[in-house]
Amino acid sequence: MSETVGARSGDEGSGPGRSPGPPACIIIGMAGSGKTTLMQQIAANLSSSRTPAYLLNLDPAVLNVPYRANIDIRDSIKYKNVMEQYRLGPNGGILTCLNLFAAQFQTVLELAEKRRNQFKYMFVDTPGQIEVFTWSASGSIITESLATTFPTCVLFVVDTVRCKSPMTFVSNMMYACSILYKTRLPLVVVFNKIDAEKHDFAVSWMEDYAVFDEVLREESTFADSLARSMAIALEEFYKNIHSVGVSAITGEGMDDLFAVIQTAAKEYDESYRPDLEARTRKRAEEEQRHAEEAYEAFQQDRDKNENRSSARNTMWAPEEDEREREDEEDQDEEELAREETEKEELLDYVAKLNIERGARPK
Ligand SMILES: Nc1nc2c(ncn2[C@@H]2O[C@H](COP(=O)(O)OP(=O)(O)OP(=O)(O)O)[C@@H](O)[C@H]2O)c(=O)[nH]1
Ligand SMILES: [Mg+2]
């Protein structure tokens, strides 16, 4: 775990030979953890220091957005209409809105990309139904597109008051851990609501397992032993993330938050971007290989068909001629045999008639 306090500027941390662009932060967190209020605080904070920012609201179901969003999903997609049209419940409605929006996200990014020199930060507010964004295809598309355009990190917002319960704390950390491995982006755990509850206890639980274990010893329920095993598993995860305490209401800790975002953006540029580019390259190579294989198979099929038809049209095949001749001869023989039989039957019939006539008295 690391936390650095530094200057507020989006121009730091340039990679070799190019400007990395302004950091983009995706704000994710459990329902009611304070994501939207944090967006509001960020907007107010940056506005007072005249730092331009690009703000996106991706929550289609929110009634009021308490900050001026540059892009608001609600402008192009109406949550209630989507629910009615597709006969969906609240979560299905949000998911479908995100799916529809993901299809337009490239255009959104192009708009932002054009203005990349005009803002220092980008922040993205997401729906409270965390799994709708984190585990959906549209969430992945939006995250990956953003990460290939700007130095991107995830701000995982946690309600510090609720984290006093060890089980809730561990559950939140497990979720944060899964997001880290899913997105493969730098992750900052933002302990929010520190005006109501300081986050020191959470930091000590993350830094020293013995402290957390001590708290669990006081109770010995099944859930606590589960929390203990999960905390052991999480020790490694804590080394790979940042954490910071803020109050979205009072603005406490905001300088620390901006500083840690800068650190995360540098990390993105130094290690996450090369990893992402390698993955993108690998995927492109695989797609290229599949396309080439498919084209080769298509060509082979086409060549085979062409050979077959040109052979039929142009090449002399004595075996075929022989077979045709034999078939014709067989047909002739059958015809002859039938005619022969008919003639014999006719002669028999005439002979029979003659006998009868002869037998009949004149
Ligand atoms: N005391 C305190 N309350 C806060 C803070 N931040 C948010 N809240 C309160 O927490 C509640 C939820 O805040 P929101 O910002 O709507 O949370 P959210 O994560 O956007 O909620 P969803 O989008 O529904 O998931 C509101 O009542 C806020 O006033 C904070 O720093 N301190
Ligand atoms: Mg919200």
Image: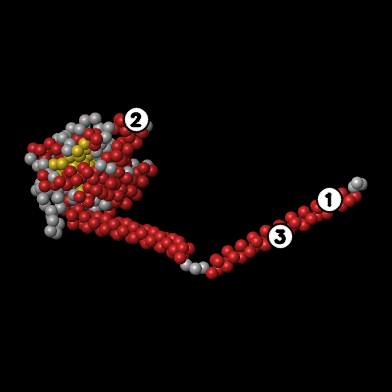
Could you tell me if the residues under marks 1 and 2 are in contact, i.e. CB atoms within 8 Å?
no
| Residue 353: mark in rendering | 1
The local crowd at label 1, few if under 14, some if 14 to 19, many if 20 or more residues have their Cα within 10 Å, is: few
The tag earlier along the polypeptide, 1 or 3, is 3
| Residue 250: mark in rendering | none
Q: Amino acid at mark 2?
A: Glu
Identify the residue at horizontal 41%, vertical 63% (top origin). 303
Q: Amino acid at mark 3?
A: Ala
The local crowd at label 3, few if under 14, some if 14 to 19, many if 20 or more residues have their Cα within 10 Å, is: few
> Considering the numbered disc 2 on the image, is that residue within a helix, a strand or a loop?
helix
Q: Where is residue 316 drawn, in percent x and y?
A: 49, 68
List the residue tagged with mark 2: 84
Identify the residue at horizontal 83%, vertical 54% (top origin). 351
List the residue tagged with mark 3: 337
Disc 3 under 8 Å from ligand 1? The reply is no
Disc 1 under 8 Å from ligand 1? The reply is no
